Amino acid sequence: MTEKAGRACPIRYRYNPRNIAQAQVTEANCLYVVGGLYGNPFALAKIKAMAAAEGARICFNGDFNWFNVDPTSFQQINEAVLKHDAIAGNVEAELAEPLDAPDCGCAYPDTVDQGTVERSNRIHTRLKTTAQHFPELTSMLVKLPFFRRYRVGEVNVGVVHGDAESLSGWRFDPAELENAANQDWLRSVFEQAEVDVFASSHTCTAGFFCLPNTAGKPLLVSNNGAAGMPSVPHSHCGLFTRIGTRPSRHPSFKSLEIKHGVWVEQLPIDYPQTDWIESFLSNWPEGSAAHTSYFQRIGRGYYTSRTV
């Protein structure tokens, strides 16, 4: 394993924000953008029930696989997700790569320690081994688009996994969004993509960042962190992004009326924690790569962890 494995961004992950502007538009009155499900079937069931109750369209924006390394869970998660809109995350994009080239495709920045990177590569190799038993599913996963475009009311939405330029980009990480040096870049990618909202995940840390464009109108990045792991501080709840022509009847973690009559919200997912821990431990016992990297966050809730 090279030191670049898990840190380098493959050229094939790159795209231009103008490509998002040219993408086919899907209309929706209510859109759920679900990033970082990470193979959590209990979060998936809760999201599907919430969506069905209000007729929402679901777009899974990548990394819906991760901990689901047993064959049954791999098949069930992917068959369920592929009945809805989906784009690839780095986890899905790397599934057809050779087993002897372990690389999770996360493009981790220098702020993430090498131990975390190496464990992520091992987690992905194990998932990739399972994926080889499902060639048809894997073929569909690696062909997923890298972004999608929606219109909710009068709001144009770009759904990505990483950022506006890369499947595994980190410029929608909360720390980067709050960096004043990035504001001109942010405005430029919104303008090029011709969107009012970007919905992302990838960095596994939730961010909800609004800035005005040159005309003073709001532009918003909603990074939901992770749907399948604790993402709301001091809780066990995951998060997803909801964009609708009316506000949700569920309490929101973050909320903004981006344009008159269109709301962007981050909604908590309160899945059965005990069941999820039991399922996780059946695949990732103490001492395993995923247990070392994630179990404190999964078991205790989201506090100060920035493990991704």
Image: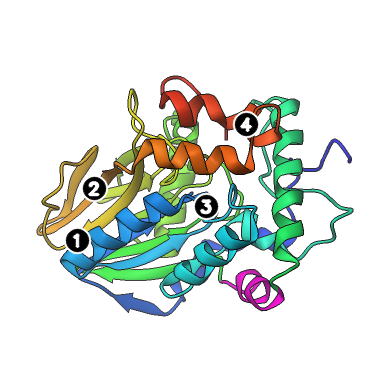
Position of residue 202 in the picture relative to residue 110 (left or right): left
- Up the image or down, 142 lies above or below 6; here it is below
C-beta proximity under 8 Å, tags 1 and 2: yes
Q: Which residues are magenta?
A: 135-144
Mark 3 — residue?
A: 39
Residue 183 spot, x, y in % from top left: 43, 39
Residue visible at 58% across and 57% down in the picture:
89
The kind of residue tagged 3 is Gly
Mark 4 — residue?
A: 291
Magenta residues: mostly which secondary structure?
A: helix
10 Å crowding of disc 4: few (<14), some (14-19), many (20+): some
Task: Give the label on residue 265, or none.
Answer: 2
Residue 82 spot, x, y in % from top left: 48, 72
Q: Report helix, strand or loop for mark 2.
A: strand
10 Å crowding of disc 3: few (<14), some (14-19), many (20+): many
Q: CA distance from mark 2 to mark 4?
A: 31 Å
Mark 1 — residue?
A: 244
Q: CA distance from mark 3 to mark 4?
A: 14 Å
Residue visible at 41% across and 72% down in the picture:
84
